[in-house]
Image (cartoon, rainbow, N blue to C red):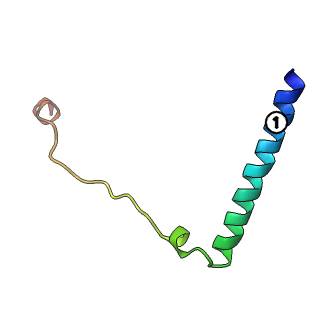
C-alpha cells in the first residue's frame, strides 16, 4: 500500500513540475504579460502608539 501512495505522489509531482516549467517558459518568452507585473508593498507610516510615546 505505501508503494502506491509513493507512486501516485511521484506522478503528481511530475505533473506539477511540468506545469511550472511550461509556465516559467511562457513568462521568459514574454507570452504571459500578466505574470510580468511588478508588485511592491509599501509600508504605511502611522502615528506612534500612545503608550510608547509617553514612555520616552
| Number of marks drawn | 1
Q: Is residue 12 above or below residue 42?
A: above
Q: Quadrant of residue 26?
A: bottom right
Residue at image coords 10%, 32%: 54
Residue 38 or residue 30, whichever sits in front: 30
- Please, is residue 50 above or below residue 17 in the view? above
Left or right of residue 26, residue 5 in this image: right
Q: What quarter of the picture does the N terminus occupy?
A: top right
Residue holding disc 1: 8
| SS label for mark 1 | helix
- Name the foreground residue: 56 vs 21: 21
Residue 55 location in percent, x, y?
A: 14, 29
Q: Position of residue 12 (x, y in %)?
A: 77, 43
- Above or below residue 6? Residue 38 is below
Q: What percent of the width, then of the height, locates residue 24? A: 68, 65
- Most extreme residue toward the top is 1
Give the x, y percent position of residue 28.
Answer: 67, 74
- Give the residue displayed 11% in from the left and 34% down from the top: 50
Say if 22 sits above or below 16 in the image.
Answer: below
Residue shown at 71% from the left, 58% from the top: 19
For residue 56, which quarter of the picture? top left
Q: As rendered, which of 23 and 12 lies closer to the eye? A: 12
Q: Which quarter of the picture shows residue 9?
A: top right
Q: Is residue 23 left or right of residue 10?
A: left
Q: Residue furthest right?
A: 3
Residue density around tag 1, few if under 14, some if 14–19, many if 20 or more, within 10 Å: few
Amino acid at each position: 500500500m505505501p508503494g502506491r501512495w509513493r507512486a501516485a505522489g511521484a506522478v503528481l509531482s511530475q505533473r506539477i513540475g511540468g506545469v511550472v516549467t511550461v509556465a516559467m517558459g511562457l513568462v521568459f518568452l514574454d507570452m504571459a504579460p500578466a505574470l510580468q507585473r511588478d508588485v511592491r508593498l509599501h509600508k504605511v507610516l502611522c502615528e506612534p502608539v500612545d503608550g510608547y510615546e509617553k514612555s520616552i
